[in-house]
Image (cartoon, rainbow, N blue to C red):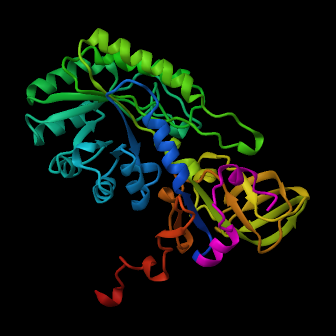
Amino acid sequence: MSNSKVTDSFDFFKGNSPKELVEKFGSPLYVISEDILRQRCREMKNLVSYPKFIPNYSAKANSNLAFLEIVQSEGLNADAMSPGEIYVELMAGFKPEQIFYISNNVSEEEMLFAIERGITVSVDSVAQLERFGKINKGGKVAIRFNSGVGAGHSAKVVTGGKKTKFAVNPEYIPEVKEILKKYDLKLVGINQHIGSLYMDAKPFLDSVKAVMEIAKQFDDLEFIDFGGGFGIPYEKLNDQPRLDLKKLGESFNAELEQFVKEYGKELTFKIEPGRYISAESSVLLGTVHSIKHNGADKYIGTDIGFNALQRPVMYDSHHDIEVYNDSTEKECVTVVGNICESGDILAKDRELPKAEIGDVIGLLDAGAYGFSMASNYNNRLRPAEVLIRENGEAVLVRKRDSLEDLTRNMISLKDL
């Protein structure tokens, strides 16, 4: 094919035809590259030379069981945002001590779910710290602090700074210390997260310095978690440059070494990359079912509705699109899905190779917040997920929803 520049550069499909994959496993279809996933894990693991450093994969980006098993086999730890993520991570082989539960506005029952399994819990408000102390007096806890720095591709994903629902502001540190003493809690770590998808290292490095100043106000910490948010280039067809990991890693490592000297103790340092590890590992394939003009606009209608990929609708996000044919003609089109919503748009006024009904298209970099945010809206079936193994074998790692799945947990009035 002549229109697969990006996936060819990665040898993404390893000889598998997108058309044949769709014919075998159904459309739409998430396709995961084991090669790329393992490569991104290793890049994060080797980000710095400081010896006590570990990336925690942020499972909210992609929580497929097979996906997590690969991440675990690469020697990464994991973080979790819910009991469900904890449950799947344990199934994937992560030990309790390798999981960090970063809670946000949760019940005591959720905290206990982690506590009872020996998993470290992070709280992100003074009120949640108080609740933790009441149910786990004398226990170990971590606290998420707001470093004052925020960054991200959308206001909806900025998690630090002045306007955020997350974390404890530094002015509440005296109150935090009172509660720690009141319930005899051991503060083992502090953590932060500034947001998702930044391509400039400066905000992250600024936040590292800020959270280190917060850390100095607590004695005998065991770890600091600096969060994630490392971006990937979503506009590869326009040759968007990558985040300079080498430069970021060198600056980050220097900050870690300096902090250890000042703190007087070797801590474990963590990061929480989700998107960087998962995004480029997956392509979402779909099929063209309709082509039409409405006025001056040409629409390419596909079976990839926003039930399968929410990011373009929720964040106005860009995903490069490949059309798997040999057309040499380009045209400006709007690519849409099959959901009964005017906002169900994958790409607006995009120049793409001319498509025909029956063509298979691929939305690139769909591995982060793709399937994990998928739904059954319009009672659509969520796609299957297929893994391209390192040897090129395509294996099913999640079945496509069935019609029976839609009503599995519903109760008919006839049965009451």
For residue 399, above or below residue 415 = above
Give x and y (percent) for residue 29. 59, 67
177 relative position to 41: left or right: left
369 relative position to 169: left or right: right
The answer, for residue 368, to whether it is visible in the render is no
> Residue 373: within the magenta?
no
Given residues 382 and 23, the one toward you in this image is: 23
Give x and y (percent) for residue 234. 66, 43
Range of residues picked out in magenta:
1-24
Q: Residue at x 88, y 56 (%)?
A: 331
Q: Residue furthest top?
A: 262
**Quadrant holding the N terminus:** bottom right
Give x and y (percent) for residue 376. 51, 69
Q: Residue at x 47, y 57 (%)?
A: 372
**Quadrant holding the C terminus:** bottom left
Given residues 169 and 51, the one toward you in this image is: 51
For residue 338, above or below residue 345 = below
Q: Residue at x 14, y 26 (%)?
A: 180
48 relative position to 362: left or right: left
> Residue 22: within the magenta?
yes
Give x and y (percent) for residue 57. 40, 44
Residue 294 lies in quadrant: bottom right
Given residues 410 and 403, the one toward you in this image is: 403
74 relative position to 294: left or right: left
Residue 300 lies in quadrant: bottom right
For residue 412, above or below residue 313 = below
Q: Residue at x 32, y 54 (%)?
A: 89
The answer, for residue 198, to whether it is visible in the render is yes
